[in-house]
Image (cartoon, rainbow, N blue to C red):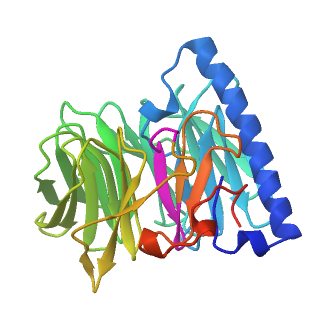
Amino acid sequence: ACRATDLKRRAGTNNWNRRLLQRVLRAAHRSASAFYCSRALVPLVCCHMGLLAASDSGGALVVGIGSGAVLWRVGTATTLRGADDERCVAVAISGDGATVATASDTKRLRCWHGDGLSEAEAPRRVSGLCIAPYGAGQVLLACCAGELYAFPLPALDKPPRRLLAHTSSVLTGVSYANGLVATADRNEKVRISQFPRCEEIESFCLGHTDFVSGVEFLSGTRLVSCGGDGYLRVWDAATGDCVAERRVGGVCTCLAVSTAAVAVATQYCLNVHVYPFVEGVLAEEPFMLDQCPDDGAPPSDLCFRGPSLVALLPGEWEGGPLVEWPRPTVPPDELSGADVEHVAGPA
């Protein structure tokens, strides 16, 4: 479900769009629930790979759910289907929203570009995805074996190239910006490499005392990470220096960044912590965004869709598994009732 300040005043096409996305997501979620039960898989709350991704403008949003994904654009909601015996573990979307990639727990990689679909087998089990706008585009696969691979786009018709490896570790995230790629692992470190020559190491970001659960670039020179030590850290990509850190508390499970704020969720807290930037500096104390109703579970993933913040919720929800805060950087005591209630889908 999603929220927007003026959704109650909207009608016609927007209401139809929300009903459409709600129907598609709920159907996919029911299918996923049956699949999890039949195979005794762990629930989504334990899977903190990238299951949400948005285009740069926010006009396209992809949600990994069940065996595939749902792609929302203005006026349409499209199901991107996987095989019945698979579970989607990661999704990515290009900055212009034209290309979507998904990865399954059976190492199946799929890429939708326009009306075309291409498939390939990943060399290893995938733990994270992103699309780098290099040439015609590259799908970057972070793998559980600690390796990073690249598939050329738009078709997955060429063999992947092994870019780098973290020794004796599991990659937990990957992010790309301006010729640099950041890879995080369970051994407490973030590596910044030049792309596509990833053997050229730009820096190491060292300071976490437990696994790193998320890494995202803020810009070409700054990136943010969070981890099991309960800290959110901002790094200088060129030097590896930590330029800011905030004690979130609890195990950080998922992360989202924008030019306006950084959002993070923790393992046992229903609230989302949002740290806005104040004159370019990360705020010392976060805003706490509440779910409505507040008897659910912590988000399994977060992403910014333009100025809005979107969360993917595990479990069964009458309105669907999505919730959106259209003004996440506004103090909660200044929000109206329309800002804190669930509605059917993206506006």
Q: Nearer the viewer, residue 263 or 154?
A: 263
Q: Give the image location of residue 334, x and y in percent.
A: 47, 76
Quadrant where the C terminus is found in the figure: bottom right
99 lies above or below 209? below
Task: Specify whether residue 122 is painted magenta.
Answer: no
Asked where in the image residue 321 lies, by quadrant, the reply is: top right
Q: Which residue is depicted at the point 29% across and 82% down? A: 278
| Image-based side of 251 in relation to 34, left or right | left
Q: Give the image location of residue 234, x and y in percent.
A: 21, 65
Task: Specify whether residue 304 is painted magenta.
Answer: yes
Q: Nearer the viewer, residue 154 or 187?
A: 187
Q: Nearer the viewer, residue 98 or 17?
A: 17
Q: Give the image location of residue 338, x and y in percent.
A: 63, 68
345 lies above or below 157? below
Query: Is residue 93 among what the camera can see?
Result: no
In the image, which residues are magenta?
295-309
Q: Give the image location of residue 11, x and y in percent.
A: 85, 70
Query: Is residue 286 among what the camera can see?
Result: yes
